[in-house]
Image (cartoon, grey):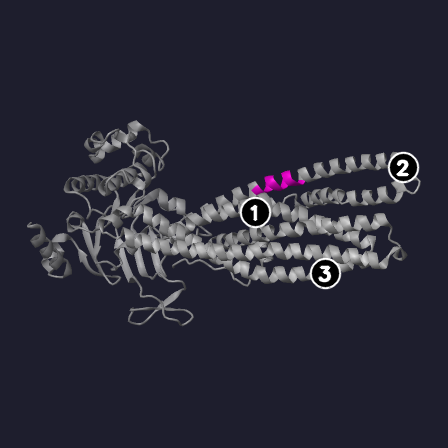
Amino acid sequence: MKAIAMPVDRSTSAISIVSRGLALSPALGRGLGVTVLLAMLGTGTRVAIPILVQLIIDRGISDDGVDFGLVAILCLVSAVVVSLSAVSLRSAIRRLGMRSEEALYGLRVKLFEHIHGLSISYHNEEKKGALVARVTSDIETLGQFFSWGALAWLLDGSLMFVIAVIMLSYDWLLAIVALVVAAPLVYGFRRVQVRLVKSYEKARTLNGSYFAEAAEFVNGSDVLVAYGQRDAYAEKLLVTMRNRYKAQIRAGFFGALLFPIGELFSVLTVVAVSVMAIVRGPEAGLTLGAVVGFIFLTYRFLEPVAEFTEIIDNTQAAVAGLTRIIEVLDTPVGPPEPLDPRPLPAGALDITFSKVWFAYQSRPTTQDPDGSRGTGLDGTEENPFVVRNLGLEIPFGQHVAVIGSTGSGKTTLGRLVSRLVDPSSGTVSIGGVPLSDVRRDDLRSVLTFVPQEPFLFDGTILSNLQFVDATADKEMCLRVADQLGLDEWLRGLPDGLATRVGERGNDLSAGERQLVALFRSAIAAPRILVLDEATSAVDPLIEVRISRAFDVLAAGRTTIAIAHRLSTAMRADRILVMDAGVIVEDGTHDELVTRGGRYSSLYEAWVVATGG
């Protein structure tokens, strides 16, 4: 069944998203209470300065002069308080920084593991650039938030809380005036933030599209140049870049509105407090020192407001990034590991398909009586099945070629055997054990799937062989190369096994990449080999080498070759011809040629085309 991204409900509050983030990164929660207490202690000692200023004015200064002894003591106390504040804040910052990096490390690992656990159908649909953005730019956005935004929330938030309590203890009426005048600031922030969230979400989405298209533009540059489409694709990329630019500018515009709003209400609040204190006069019981200290506290209370404009900006970007990360993590992995796994037998591993249906779809399906189209269990029509009611047995050691036109289901058959996808209904078994009951590692130890476009990692040929078996040294690899008949090819390379393949193997030809893939499969030594052949774009010499290597590799094991050339099918013990998800012909080359069916027609056309 097709795995699709499970989108996070956009109505979900930022608090809910952050709560999910904390659940995904438990390192953040460890010792969080101690960190908050240290932050509150640090900020609490900071607000002691206005109180000390009040004491100096009210008690240290009088009509008789200045009490230098008292002032000196209060200044000494101030120094101790400032030192205590510095130590507490440093401890809080250090603890938060360490926990943040630990949490980000864990989230990266979890995201990478989850992406590799997603079904092959999901990876076919999800552009690689978008997934790369999840583990790079979105994680980096969270890193920027933890390095500054989260710290600001912790320190500035605790500072405002402590000051608000002290202001109420000073004079509840002045405190209410300050809070009432500043209250509209919350409404203004809220209105701007709603637009800011939408703007950032759109900007992040377009950022993912930009990464995907930029990767295509760079990786497909040779194809674009060959077909004269470089300028056309560049124009498409330019449109995406322009839309991304506009979205970023719009988000920046709303972010810029927050700063003047905060400054305006800061001034209004201080003015209102000052006027109220003057109007009430000494009769209200406020000394000159208390008024000055309260104004100091008001400034301290409003200090973070201007910074909150950037904090909210940073936070919204982090929440948008976290939302997109959660969307990936909420996508069901597939195929899932069995809850009660069964071991594969040690002997012959026959392959059996029993009433197998498969469609790339988002919901479980049932089939129509004529088997032509799948229908979702909720009654909605789904995509046509690409494999329909397939029953098939492949004895161990048999070499099978599967042919058919594009969309016939032949590649899907190979994916089902390899359990890169699970049937929508029915069962695929190996050695009598349904694949859904087999652990992924157990299956990979006996079966290797070679895709049509094998992926090579940037490095040497040897490193691309050793990642399937770390014990495979140079001598072992040379012996395997000799067995596969690839020794001559290796000697023709600049550095033999030490030849670098380049990014994605681009320094090698398509055929040479296939040779390395077969070489790698021989190192893995599976009992079952599934090969999605890609020899249509290789030169004749490489094709001969691939064919010889495959024949050697096939000895003593079951092979299923998704054949794109009849020359491959002709060498197989058995040929399956597929059409519209159904096996329409099954037999040996000679049997199918004499039968006069579809394979016979393909063979006759191939003979005419090749002059054979």
Q: CB atoms at circles 3 and 2 under 8 Å apart?
A: no
* Vertical position of residue 168 compared to residue 11: above or below: above
2 or 1: mark nearer the eye: 2
Q: Which residue, given by chain and number where applicable, does mark 2 sit on?
A: 67
Q: Nearer the viewer, residue 254 or 225?
A: 254
Residue, far top? 475
Q: Is residue 214 visible?
A: yes
Name which residue lies at 46% across and 51% down: 340
Name which residue lies at 72% across and 51% down: 301
Q: Nearer the viewer, residue 425 or 218?
A: 218
Residue type (three-letter) at the residue carrying disc 2: Asp
Q: Nearer the viewer, residue 467 or 369?
A: 467
Q: Which residue, given by chain and number where applicable, does mark 1 sit on?
A: 145
Q: Earlier in the sequence, mark 3 or mark 2?
A: 2
Q: Is residue 12 visible?
A: no
Residue 583 position by quadrant: bottom left
Q: Which residues are drawn in magenta? A: 92-100
* Vertical position of residue 556 compared to residue 417: above or below: above
- Secondary structure under tag 1 reads helix
Name which residue lies at 32% across and 35% down: 465
3D distance between C-alphas at marks 3 and 2: 38 Å
